[in-house]
Image (tube, rainbow, N blue to C red):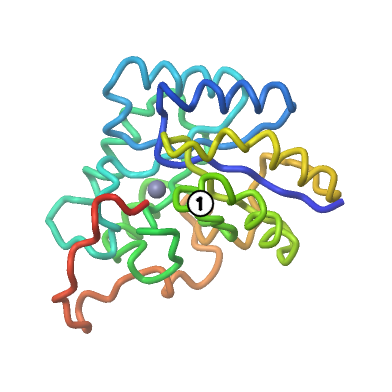
Amino acid sequence: MKKITLSFDNGPDPEVTPAVLDVLAQKGVKASFFVVGDKLRDPERLALAQRAHAEGHWIGNHTFNHLVPLGRSQHEGVTALEIGRTQDLIGGLAHEMKFFRPFGGGGNLNADLLDRNARDYLQKEGFTCVLWNVVPRDWEQPAQWVETAMQMCRTIDHPLIVLHDITTGAMAYLDEFIDRAERDGMTFVQDFPAACLPMVRGKVMFDMSPFIADHGSRAYARPEIRKDRL
Ligand SMILES: [Zn+2]
């Protein structure tokens, strides 16, 4: 049995998340939602996170502002704001493993994801860091991502796919993707593949250095990331 795991980042969104939850309920699939802290300050969006949690989905932390990958930010105190404040807003909806997914600036698994402060903070606070292995770039190709995702999933042992419950139109094809993946012999599970969890409950599981910026030794005149990138 080949496993596949779904995750939805950057929501909740009143125009998209309810339909995503409806599809997941109809298909009997449990997933994870990595929410943006700033959005939870809106009661309507918070209610959607509550609904997802009540329906058995896991809620994870996906930073507060979601504007600059933590590895690119050098502002004092940014870690506590981006991770800690979001965790406070998630409150009782948090999974007991305290899932945190860094903002990837376009889905890139590189040293922009974290800096040492962020790693130390996640470790001290007992977080589980959840990365990914399939990014079909649904925001760039809202009508074609299903085919891309299918091709990518076929090459990976246990795909952990990143989708986005935001207003791109891409989630109109979620049910089609689930059907195709199941027809292809994949079974949807909620657990994450171990290869995507470099830190579990604050314990480092494998070398995290590829994901951690080294502010001390590299030139730091890089442009800020564009706001519209995911
Ligand atoms: Zn994101």
Q: Nearer the viewer, residue 130 or 40?
A: 40
| Quadrant in which residue 117 is drawn | bottom left
Left or right of 120? Residue 100 is right
| Quadrant in which residue 80 is drawn | top left
Image point (49%, 62%), residue name: 204
Q: Is residue 127 above or below residue 87?
A: below
Q: Amino acid at mark 1?
A: Gln
Image point (45%, 48%), residue name: 139
Q: Nearer the viewer, residue 10 or 205?
A: 10
Q: In the image, residue 7 lies at what x, y percent?
A: 56, 42
Q: In the image, residue 17 lies at what x, y percent?
A: 49, 26
| Quadrant in which residue 76 is drawn | bottom left
Q: How many marks on residues? A: 1
Q: Is residue 55 above or below residue 218?
A: above
Q: In the image, residue 53 lies at what x, y percent?
A: 54, 23
Residue at which label 1 appears:
141
Mark 1 near ligand 1 (CB under 8 Å)?
no
Image point (73%, 66%), residue name: 155
Q: Nearer the viewer, residue 126 or 1?
A: 1
Q: Is residue 89 above or below residue 193?
A: above
Q: In the image, residue 64 lies at what x, y percent?
A: 28, 40
Image point (55%, 63%), residue name: 205
Q: Nearer the viewer, residue 84 or 163?
A: 163
- Helix, strand or loop for disc 1: loop
| Mark 1 surroundings within 10 Å by alpha-carbon count, few (fewer than 14), some (14 through 19), many (20 or more) | some
